[in-house]
Image (cartoon, rainbow, N blue to C red):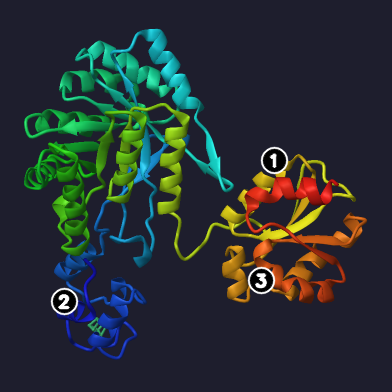
């Protein structure tokens, strides 16, 4: 937990010697609390003060990195309970299971399918980052072979097994990829910690309640394992969800270090719908890694969309570059319409224009990433802004006509826009989904 200026002041020498460039120790403490200066600027700070301040400055939830190269994944390092307080930093890692009891052909097909998933939404890639190799067979050799197969997906690996023997066999094949070993229980803590330490990979601590988890992480830390994740293996969904929330609160609000690690959770049972619903709830509260079983693209897309929305910085809307875009083979007779550079708005319009199969120009106007109505009500979208964009895009030289289709929601600006640009203004539909019909009826007729 961050220390206040007065807390820091108590740790300083209080000699007011000014060597730090501040007039008093109190002034220095206040500046340090605001992160305007560094403790190194006080040459007389005691080792105890340095240790206490370093501990206070450590992130309340430790960053966990696993995987290697392009398949590297990270979780944790979160600083707030609610997104609007600042933002969430590391999007939940989504992992898909690869059980080791599948027939070889089925396992290979599943690995290939996992590798092939590539989703994009509003111009952003939405990756599946990890594969969870699950030791359902209970056989160490099969687990190792499946881990080796999982390596071909080039995703970060999670080795899910209770057995130190199986973990050792798999690590022998894949430890160079820095897999996440999942996990150590109270019974297997010594053996799993030794394996994780030897392989240099992070480790999951697994227990059924918060107290046992905290005891286990302290034990693993004592054994030299600092890179940990927590698996609250609760008896039911309600206990799990409330437990995960409690862990986050304890880590952030009470700086309770034994639970200051990212969380891993499993939504691997039930229908794809049930898995997605559970996994999306786990993304919200507060899993850093969620493992699912389903391979249904629609289910994964829903989960990834929920993640994308949750981890978007609320202060920075996702934006596209404001400029002129051609949809299809747009030419001098193609319709021209404008929209704003809020990604969701732009890509929705672009998709609907594409669906019309009428090559078109979309003039994407800079509204600082806000939607049409928000921009208009905040005066970020007016006749002057659109006229400036029209001119910057040199549209008069690109198209022969002088007709501009505007969003139906801002029909009110058509008069002023016509006067400002000299173009004929056509009021388009309010809803983007009507664009294909509109273009066919109004433009193509
Ligand atoms: Fe106080 Fe250290 Fe600054 Fe001297 S250098 S005034 S002891 S904070």
- Residue that mark 3 sits on: 381
Q: Is residue 360 left or right of residue 39?
A: right
Residue 231 position, x and y percent, is: 19, 39
Marked residue nearer the N-terminal end (1 or 2): 2
Q: Which of the four quarters of the rendered structure image does ligand 1 lie in?
A: bottom left
Marked residue nearer the N-terminal end (1 or 3): 1
Quadrant holding the N terminus: bottom left
* Residue in view at x 38 percent, y 14 percent: 107
Q: In this view of the protein, which residue sits in the foreground, 12 or 392?
A: 392
Marked residue nearer the N-terminal end (3 or 2): 2
Q: In this view of the protein, which residue sits in the foreground, 307 or 12?
A: 307
Q: Is residue 69 visible?
A: no
- Residue that mark 1 sits on: 355
Q: Answer whether labels 3 and 2 touch (C-beta < 8 Å).
A: no
Picture quadrant where residue 239 is located: top left
Specify few, some or many for label 1: CA neighbours under 10 Å numbering under 14, 14-19, or 20 or more. some
- Residue that mark 2 sits on: 11
Q: Nearer the viewer, mark 3 or mark 2?
A: 3
Q: Is mark 1 within 8 Å of ligand 1?
A: no
Q: In this view of the protein, which residue sits in the foreground, 289 or 347?
A: 347
Picture quadrant where residue 11 is located: bottom left
Specify few, some or many for label 2: CA neighbours under 10 Å numbering under 14, 14-19, or 20 or more. some
Residue 363 position, x and y percent, is: 74, 58
Q: Nearer the viewer, mark 1 or mark 3?
A: 1
SS at mark 1 in the image: helix
């Amino acid at each position: 937990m961050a220390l206040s200026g007065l807390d820091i002041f108590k740790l300083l020498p209080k000699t007011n010697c000014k060597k730090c460039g501040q007039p008093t120790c109190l002034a220095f403490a206040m500046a340090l609390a605001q992160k305007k200066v560094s403790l190194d600027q006080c040459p007389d700070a005691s080792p105890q003060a340095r240790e206490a301040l370093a501990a206070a400055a450590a992130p309340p939830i430790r960053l966990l990195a696993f995987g290697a190269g392009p398949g590297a994944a990270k979780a944790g390092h979160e600083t707030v309970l609610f997104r609007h307080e600042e933002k969430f930093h590391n999007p939940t890692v989504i992992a898909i299971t690869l059980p080791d009891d599948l027939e070889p052909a089925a396992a290979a097909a599943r690995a290939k399918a996992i590798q092939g998933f590539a989703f994009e939404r509003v111009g952003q890639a939405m990756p599946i980052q990890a594969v969870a190799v699950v030791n359902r067979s209970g056989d160490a050799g099969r687990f190792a072979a499946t881990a080796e197969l999982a390596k071909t997906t080039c995703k970060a690996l999670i080795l899910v097994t209770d057995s130190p023997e199986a973990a050792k066999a798999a690590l022998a094949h894949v430890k160079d990829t820095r897999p996440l070993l999942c996990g150590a229980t109270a019974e297997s803590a010594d053996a799993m910690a030794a394996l994780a330490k030897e392989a240099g990979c992070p480790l999951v601590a697994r227990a059924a309640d918060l107290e046992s988890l905290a005891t286990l992480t302290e034990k693993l830390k004592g054994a030299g394992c600092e890179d940990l994740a927590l698996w609250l293996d609760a008896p039911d969904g309600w206990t799990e969800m409330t437990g995960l929330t409690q862990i986050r609160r304890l880590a952030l609000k009470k700086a309770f270090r034994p639970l200051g690690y990212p969380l891993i959770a499993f939504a691997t049972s039930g229908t794809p719908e049930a898995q997605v619903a559970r996994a999306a709830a786990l993304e919200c509260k507060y899993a850093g890694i969620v493992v699912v079983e389903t391979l249904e693209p629609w289910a994964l897309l829903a989960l990834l969309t929920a993640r994308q929305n949750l981890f978007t910085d609320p202060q920075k809307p996702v934006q596209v570059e404001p400029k002129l875009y051609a949809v299809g083979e747009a030419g001098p007779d193609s319709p021209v319409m404008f929209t704003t550079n809020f990604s969701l708005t732009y890509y929705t319009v672009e998709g609907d224009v594409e669906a019309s199969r009428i090559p078109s120009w979309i003039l994407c106007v800079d509204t600082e990433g806000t939607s049409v109505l928000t921009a208009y009500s905040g005066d970020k979208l007016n006749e002057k802004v659109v006229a400036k964009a029209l001119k910057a895009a040199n549209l008069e030289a690109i198209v022969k006509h002088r007709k501009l289709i505007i969003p139906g929601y801002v029909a009110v600006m058509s008069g002023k826009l016509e006067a400002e640009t000299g173009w004929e203004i056509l009021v388009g539909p309010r809803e983007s989904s009507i664009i294909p019909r509109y273009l066919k009826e109004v433009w193509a007729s």
